Image: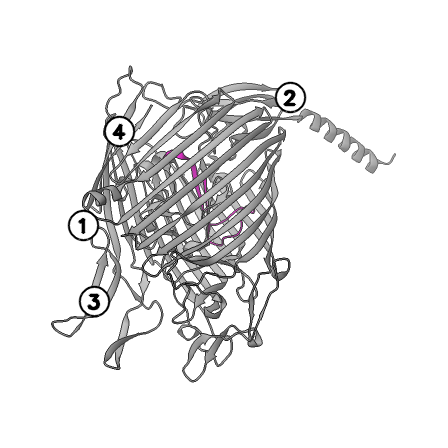
Amino acid sequence: MSHKYLVVFLACIGHFFMLQAQEKFTLSGTISEEASNETLIGVSIVIPELKTGAITNEYGFYSITLPKGQYQIVVSYLGFQEIVETIDLQGNLKKDYQLTEKTQELEEVVLVDDVERLDIRKPQMSVNTLGAQTIKEIPVVLGEADVIKSLTLLPGVSNGGEASSGFNVRGGAADQNLILLDEATVFNSSHLFGFFSVFNPDAIKDVKLFKGGIPSRYGGRVSSVLEIFQKEGNSKEIKVNGGIGAVASRLLIEGPIQKDKTAFLIGGRASYAHLFLALAGEENKAYFYDLNTKINHKINENNNIYLSGYFGRDLFNISDAFVNVYGNAVGNFRWNHLFSDRLFSNLSLIYSDYFYGLELDFVGFEWDSGIQNFNVKYDLKHYLNNKLQLNYGLNSIYYVFNPGKIIPNSPDSGIVEEQLTKKYANENAVYVDIEHEITSNLSMEYGLRLSHFNRMGQDEFYVYQNDSPVDFDPSAQVYREGTPIDTINPGRGGSMEAYFNFEPRISMSYTFNENNSIKASYTRISQYLHLLSNTNSPTPLDVWTPSGPFVKPQLQDQYAVGYFRNINQGDYNFETEAFYKDLQNRIDYIDGANLIANNAIEQVILNGQARAYGLEFLLRKNSGRFKGWLSYTLSKSEQRTPGRTEQETGINFGEWYNTPYDKTHDLAINGSFDVNEKWKFNANFIYQTGQPTNYPIGQFEYEGLQVPYYGLRNKERLPAYHRMDISAVLTPLRNKRKKVQSEWVFSIYNVYGRKNAASINFRENEDTGRNEAIRTSIFGIIPSVTYNFKF
């Protein structure tokens, strides 16, 4: 044997013994709350001596692979007592933990070791998380805790103003946000046209907003993902909590069906402002109600099933002559299966429906529209080792779009029943996502999503000359609706158009030390659904439509880079991010576009592009009697719709113009102060640049009427928006003999009475004959009182 081969042989033998010496085993399990058996999301399991750890997934499961040996394990979660114990890992070990909520009577555990802060090292960026308790403490209009309004206090998130539904993320439109409640899509997130959101804070377990660096398991919206999980229900004992407010009340009951094995949750909310209107002799009504339900059952150590649902409705009635009903209904059946201590799976069967109904008695018809989807998802998480995790899965969504149906509501109605052409589509995707700790300083998350969208056939479809549903009049320099040259009936069985897109995702984190890191991400994502709306924020009347022969899918590339720092052992956090978004195929509308009851919406749509860029800053204080955060965003959001040929002008002559949700400056401050065991004070301050709008730049006379005309789109702005809110929480000292715990929340919305402009309209003064601007404001100072209880 030559010297060279001997060296190789000895090296192999040495490597074999080294592997034996580094024999590894897996520590895995589930972490839950001791008082209820509710699983906990995002719990940190840290091994300080190895400077490594894991975090529980959406179902409280964790898995970490370690060399054989004895270790100290630290289990920690905000608001709960830490667990510190020593384990002897001599083989694969399943270890479940139950955490106890912190109270004044319990002594806090203090760690001497400088435990590694995993959030700094994780490559995931552009993510914000809010706890249910934080949401409840933020002062809001009429004292109703609100998830959506709370999100607008975070950097990069804004909305269209007071009483506006939806929210805008990093210069994106409201319809570009994927809103998930227990994995089911929510198409309209508002009650009472934007005054409140549809999410009951008592039923919420976790809220997470992805603004960028979106993992490959998510798709279908280009701007953000808002993921909300409901509680699972207390499997130990019956618990009741709720609240009585100025305009609405809520009640939630949870408890065991079979102790420690099967639990239920049912919660409801309802507003009752319309009752006061009736007492005052008013025939008008405006109210909402919703219902949250969930059942979970533990079959055995490796299998759990969940059945959850949400149903909500809004009703707006003006003397029975105008009746508007709209709302969401979602349901999800999930099966968690543990193949091994390293392979976790979740199968979901999901249904989602958004309905909009309108009845105009004085005209004599009813109007129904909406969107339904049926979704099958299968996700797997494979913990290969503590440095490499693999996420992969698939999903298939079937859509039914109902753009509208007109029904006569009386025998003497002159309306003829008509169903606008329904549309159908199928969206499929497969994905793989890898979480990889390359070195002790460098971590990456990278993956690929492959999406396929099939616009299925329909009963009636218009054909146009040169496949152009929008005509351009060069003499008048205006766009007009095209005239169909034929009508075909492809039927539901065929395919009218299909799209296939590669969506790569990558993010990385480089850690300088345990308190400083930089992160960067790139995300490509596609969106196949479009919301037809000519308002700044979504309304119930807005209609969703799929991509197809004339409407292309939106494709977006987002780049982000940021710096993250823990200060004073994590008492403070500082984050700053810069982002750039480039969007293709963003639709806009020709002047005078009619979107309501339009059976040929392609005749008023033009495809353009959009871009957004900016800087975000967040400084958060996490501990002490005073807590809170300051966020600031400096950004720009623009859109461009050039002409399709050299002769066409496009919109705004093909130049960039502000989107309706462009906010140059967005500042938010939130603070809370614990005075003592009885009193806690909270305050918000918000400042935003006024949203873009159009003002008339002149007028002309036509047949004796003064007709205003407008300049370039979104050239002007409303006045700046700002307000301050305060609240005080009074928690009476608890009598230990009584099981009931309660609190009073006193709040004042818009303390200094700022008359923020919802719109500005122009009219001719009847006395002077001169034009004047009229500012419309919605809220002044609004005090409120809410009583919360639980037992």
Please tell me whether mark 1 or mark 2 is closer to you in this view: 1
Is residue 634 highlighted in magenta?
Answer: no
The region drawn magenta spans 202-228
Q: Is residue 183 visible?
A: yes
The residue pinned by badge 4 equals 743
**Nearer the N terminus, badge 4 or badge 3?**
4
Location of residue 375 with respect to 623 vertically, above or below: below
The residue pinned by badge 1 equals 753
Q: Is residue 438 visible?
A: no
The residue pinned by badge 3 equals 773
Report the side of 569 relative to 304 (left or right): left
Q: How crowded is mark 4: few (under 14 residues within 10 Å), some or many (20 or more)?
A: some
Identify the image quadrant of residue 623.
top left
Q: Which of 298 and 481 is in front in this view?
A: 481
Mark 3 secondary-structure assignment = strand
Instruction: Find out whether the residues at labels 4 and 3 contact each other: C-beta distance under 8 Å.
Output: no
Location of residue 545 with respect to 136 vertically, above or below: below
Instruction: Find out whether the residues at labels 1 and 4 contact each other: C-beta distance under 8 Å.
Output: no
Q: Distance between the residues labelled 1 and 2?
A: 65 Å
**Residue 78 picture location, percent across and down:** 40, 30
Mark 1 secondary-structure assignment = loop
Q: Residues within 10 Å of mark 1 (few under 14, many from 20)?
A: few
Q: How far apart are marks 4 and 3 (CA)?
A: 45 Å
The residue pinned by badge 2 equals 91
Residue at x 27%, y 52% (from the top left corner): 319
